[in-house]
Image (cartoon, rainbow, N blue to C red):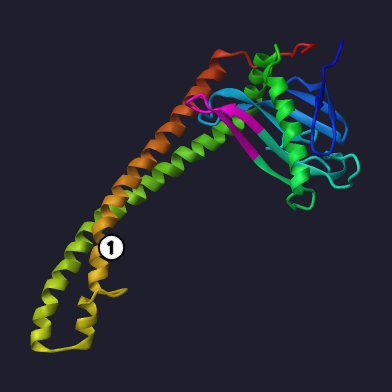
Amino acid sequence: MTRPILTIDTPAGPVRATADHRADDAVVFELGGAMRGSVHAMGTTGPNRWDRFTAVRACLGPVNAYTTTAPDDNLPRLARGHTGHHGSLTPSRDHADRPHVSVQPLSTTADHPPSEKTEAVLTAVLRSCAEHVAQRADLPAILEASRQRDTPGLLRFLTWSASYHQAEAARLEREARTALPARKAAEAAWRTAPRWLSFSPNPVLLLMLANLPDSLTQKIRGLQWWAPYCVSAAAEEHERARRAQEEADLLRAQQRRRPRRRPALAGTA
């Protein structure tokens, strides 16, 4: 069957990306022209929901860049260069249907950032490969296979996330509860200090009442906003925990509804 060939204009010259299948959850592009190596394009979650596989992530190298690392000599490089590169790019649309691009930092095998020209070449190739796969007729099969591949890891992450944010919310609520009596105690001490001064003029007492760092006055001011801040931050943590739990529940429901067999991809674009 005819394999689609993309011709991508880059600052280093044209790059040819020939689409092929190496696994049922991804499309591999073999590179020629101004670059050599391969790009691995697969389904992934959108920018706003971990439970919805709606985007395509293009990775440098014949691997899933989020879970494994290709050997250095397998990583893509410029045709006249000797340095491999890794990283990924995910074009998608946000909650307002605006274009959004997420980039896993591009770097060399020595973890150095690429030159501006090389970065432009890598970005153009990754974007073209991802956008090509996003238009394929077999995209639903790619996204479904990617969902099955990534769901176990996502469930572990979301379960941890829900627990972490609940614990943070509980900690902030404890902070809010202790801030009120601490502020009342500090205010009582502040009101008492002038009486102490009348009996024993002491420079330390003056410093406590002055508007200076670490003074009693500054402590009271800090405690006045600390409790409301903790209450607000705790509410945000509860919302993060709720959302993580909701997305985990939806992923589990998808697992129950759909067959465990990974769908085969079509042989043509």
Residue 261 shows up from this direction? no
Nearest the viewer among 83 and 123 is 123
At x 86%, y 12%, the residue is 2
At x 34%, y 50%, the residue is 172
Q: Is residue 1 left or right of residue 151?
A: right
The kind of residue on which mark 1 rests is Gly
At x 63%, y 27%, the residue is 44
Across the whole image, how many numbered discs are drawn on residues?
A: 1
Q: Position of residue 102 (x, y in %)?
A: 61, 36
Q: Is residue 82 left or right of residue 206?
A: right
Q: Does the magenta-highlighted stretch encompass residue 132?
A: no
Q: Position of residue 239 (x, y in %)?
A: 38, 36
Q: What secondary structure is found at the residue carrying circle 1?
A: helix
Q: Is residue 187 above or below residue 73?
A: below
Q: Main secondary structure of the magenta part?
A: strand
Residue 74 shows up from this direction? yes
Nearest the viewer among 199 and 172 is 199
Q: The N terminus is located in which quarter? A: top right
Q: Is residue 203 left or right of residue 116?
A: left
At x 20%, y 68%, the residue is 186
Q: Is residue 121 above or below residue 136?
A: below
Question: What residue did someone put label 1 on?
Answer: 222
Q: Which picture quadrant has residue 214?
A: bottom left
Q: Which picture quadrant has residue 245?
A: top left
Which portion, as a residue range, is magenta?
A: 90-103
Q: Does the magenta-highlighted stretch encompass residue 99?
A: yes
Q: The C terminus is located in which quarter? A: top right
Q: Residues within 10 Å of mark 1 (few under 14, many from 20)?
A: few
